[in-house]
Image: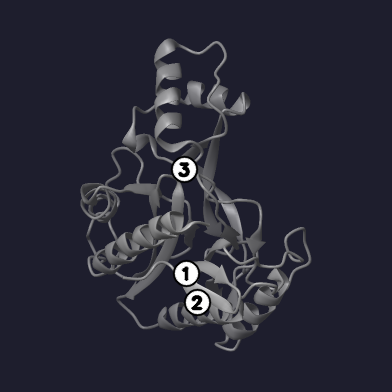
Amino acid sequence: MDDDTIEKYYKAGNILATALKKAKEKVKPGVKLIEITQLIEDELIRKKGYSPAFPLNIGINEITAHYACPPGDMTAFPEEGVVKLDAGVHIEGYTTDMAVSVGYGTDKYQVLIEAAEAGLETAIKTIKAGVRVKEVGIAVEHTIRSFGVRPISNLSGHLMTQFQLHAGVSVPNVRVENASSSYRFREGDIFALEPFTTYESAAGYVKNGKEICIYSLIKRKTRNMPSQVTRLINRIWGERRTLPFSFRWYSQLPQAILNRLESQKILHGYPVLIEASLQPVAQAEKTILVQRDGCEIITEE
């Protein structure tokens, strides 16, 4: 990568880290999720002149990923819980991704948060150019289990490239043998690393919920669609390419149109992910730049 591209990543990472630090302090019982969402997406990202890489994900307890406020959402934080705030910032498609967890109302979630953060630290210390992906999974799982909790087995970190949030290589948080596991990190790679943790008694994996709050475009060409739908698709593509979005940012389309767009492989929906045994989950995530002798954290103030 050239210096200009690297500068874009670090600038996006700084904006993101600052936004999440400020928003984390606002998570309290009774506060509406849309208030935190508007704070991050609008006040701390857009008004600074930047763009969200995807809608803010807010996961409460067993809700692990992909819940973002839909249009008209009035949900509020419960009296106690562990909340995941997962956000991204992009500059010209160069994307950073970061998440923090907040436990409140009780101390019982603290071990999950500490284990996730320790697993993330282990991943960062393990990665350098030439290291295989599966070595990271082994190390992260060992660290997390040393806290007496377990990692979520079917969620992973991911390679990111311009306008591609998930660019084909995953970084597991457990020991695995799959298509990505033999990949060796390369100098200049940009990865989001994100361990998720839950209690030892939990199922330890996520399943799809029924709700879809987040979408992305696969392509822009539509067939036999009303002109206003085609215009909306062209607008979204022009602004985001394949980066995820919420219809809260645009005009909500009828479900029948959404179904047609999905069947034509134009639109992809991301179901809300829920821990399979409905146990609480914590998350820690940062974006890193792989270097010859280690890696650098991009998402820092």
Amino acid type, residue under disc 3 in the picture: Pro
* Residue 119, image quadrant: bottom right
Query: Residue 251, relative to residue 75: is it above or below?
Result: above
Amino acid type, residue under disc 2 in the picture: Ala
Residue 229, visible in the rendered structure = yes
Going from N to C along the chain, the mark reached first, 1 or 3, is 3
Please give left or right for residue 241 compared with residue 187 in the image.
left
Front of the two marks 3 and 2: 3
Residue assigned mark 3: 244
Measured from the top left, where is residue 35 in percent x and y? Answer: 22, 53
Measured from the top left, where is residue 87 in percent x and y? Answer: 39, 57
Amino acid type, residue under disc 1 in the picture: Gln
* Residue drawn at the location 39% of the way across and 15% of the way down: 228
* Residue drawn at the location 55% of the way across and 51% of the way down: 161
SS at mark 1 in the image: strand
Query: Residue 74, relative to residue 117: is it above or below?
Result: above
SS at mark 3 in the image: loop
Residue assigned mark 2: 116
Q: Residues within 10 Å of mark 3 (few under 14, many from 20)?
A: many
Please give left or right for residue 287 compared with residue 206 in the image.
left
Disc 3 and disc 2 in contact, CB within 8 angstroms: no
Going from N to C along the chain, the mark reached first, 3 or 2, is 2
* Residue drawn at the location 39% of the way across and 69% of the way down: 100
Please give left or right for residue 23 compared with residue 161 in the image.
left
Going from N to C along the chain, the mark reached first, 1 or 2, is 2
Residue assigned mark 1: 283
Q: Residues within 10 Å of mark 1 (few under 14, many from 20)?
A: many
Query: Residue 4, relative to residue 261: is it above or below?
Result: below
Disc 1 and disc 2 in contact, CB within 8 angstroms: yes
